[in-house]
Amino acid sequence: MVVSVPPDLRFSDSLYLLFGASILKDDIAVYQKIPSYLRPLISFLNAFPSLGNKIYAGQLTKAQQGRDPEIVKKSRIDDILEKEFLSYHREVLQGKKVDSIFLGASSGGSLHLADIMRYPMLFSGLNITVTRRGGDPDDAQGFIEFGRNLMKDFLPNNDNLEIVIHFDPIHDRTNLPFVFHFRSKFWLPNAYQKFIKDHLKRGGNIVFFDVQEPWLHYKLDDRFYYQCGGLDDLTPEEYAFGSKRIDTWLKQVGASHRGGWGIEEEKPAKSYDSEFANSPRMVKAAKDFAKDQGYNFIHIKANKAHDLSAMTTYLVHQAMVEKGIKPRGVIVEQYTQLVPLAVRRLGLLPVWTYYVLRTSYNDTKKMLDKVFEDYLEEAEELVFLPTQPWNPSPLGDFVTYEEWEKLFKSYPVKKYTILMNPELYPMDVPSIVMGPINLQKRCLKERDLGLKISLEDIKSACKKFGLSYQ
């Protein structure tokens, strides 16, 4: 079955929340379903990519949806979680209790472990998208003031969380004129507490995958922060204070703004990335809850999301070796483009990165180097499941398809499966949905490999890869 996120919650956090349950049913989570009557048009645009690029660029601006600001002010995160996400988790579990429940930051690494170990996973935040038409994508102050107005009502209605306004005028430039978005970074919502009580066995394990990807935050108020920019090659300092390559790029895109998007005369503090890290307060809240309820608390800490991803690749390889299975190849996944079933059914080693730009490219290379040095002499197949960044970003940050292709062809691989149209990159919008669905259909035709990974296996791997396990 294909499950999709609500149209006005269409962001990475929502997809991970659905994945945390869909893995237990061998379902696939996507941003939206594509009606069958649109398939001929998509095929036509694939055949004429110059036209396709123009049409998809126009559709991106029309596709932005947000919630009414007045409704958001009165919203409660617990209600949204129950209605839009945990109801699906409960449907999947059908009243069953499990030995362990995973918590943590959005990550393909931890999701693959939850999938193989057959445990549900609850992730660390939710991006709320709010309608705001006519915004200037460089007007950080206007973005912040809009957020302040929302939070006057929203924060008093919502405890057990903190808010991070996430303003990325480069990677999110196409949606900023239409919507405002902020992240509710959970401590431990009441909805999560109830779900754990209902579905975790007495004395069971709360396993927390704590990822602390560093970034800069400006404190706006109690439980209220501002973050400009997001993970990949551009640094938090460049976003806050500007750089030569950002100014060059701003000139290229016709913007009058120069410099960064920090708050003038204020100093940001070292903190965490709101999209691919969790609040440190969530760790404490989960630990305290586990102690109060008599659960075991296991804390796995990684400073970088890609460190957790590399460890997962190793653990999957070990699981295959123990079953006497030779891995068929590799699946390179990005951002929310994930098909966990490809590991359990097709025998592919997962290599996941949080995005598609330069740092992700460099870390993909490191992980693939490791795969072909230690795990595989030759791959039967390399599957590439890319996201589509849409916005070419400043010099050094953006990676062309030709660079990805050159990287993959530097390894001993018999067959390359590229789940997008290279001639439409980075605008092949339908591939974000159709790529995972088509691969999922292929997986469902194969038998499960019966891979096994234990908490002791994870503990040993943490020591090997320098992650903390307590």
Image: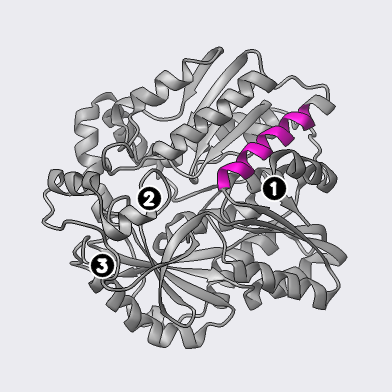
Please state which of residues 372 and 89 is positioned toward the viewer in this rendering.
Answer: 372
| 145 vs 122, nearest the viewer | 145
Q: Residue 205 placed where, x, y %?
A: 81, 61
Q: Secondary structure at mark 2?
A: loop
**Outermost residue, right direction?**
203
Density class for disc 2 (Cα within 10 Å; few <14, some 14-19, many ≥20) is some
Q: Which residues are magenta?
A: 305-320
The residue under label 2 is which amino acid type?
Answer: Thr
Q: Residue at 31% x, 56% y: name it.
A: 239
Q: CA distance from mark 1 to mark 2?
A: 24 Å
N-term mark: 1 or 2: 2
Q: Main secondary structure of the magenta part?
A: helix
Mark 3: which secondary structure? helix
Query: What residue sits 74% from the left and 69% below the top?
Result: 196
Q: Which quadrant would residue 394 be assigned to in this image? A: top left
Could you tell me the amino acid type at mark 3?
A: Ala
Q: In terms of sequence position, does the residue under pointer 3 or pointer 2 come before the other? A: 3
Kindly identify which numbered label has been placed on residue 467: 1
Which label lies toward us, 3 or 2?
A: 2
Relative placement, left or right, of 366 versus 171 is right
- The residue identified by callout 2 is 235
Magenta stretch contains residue 86: no
Q: Residue at x 30, y 65 (%)?
A: 262
**Nearer to me, 131 or 373:** 373
Q: CA distance from mark 3 to mark 2?
A: 17 Å
Local crowd at mark 1 within 10 Å, few (<14), some, or many (≥20)? many
The disc placed on residue 140 is 3
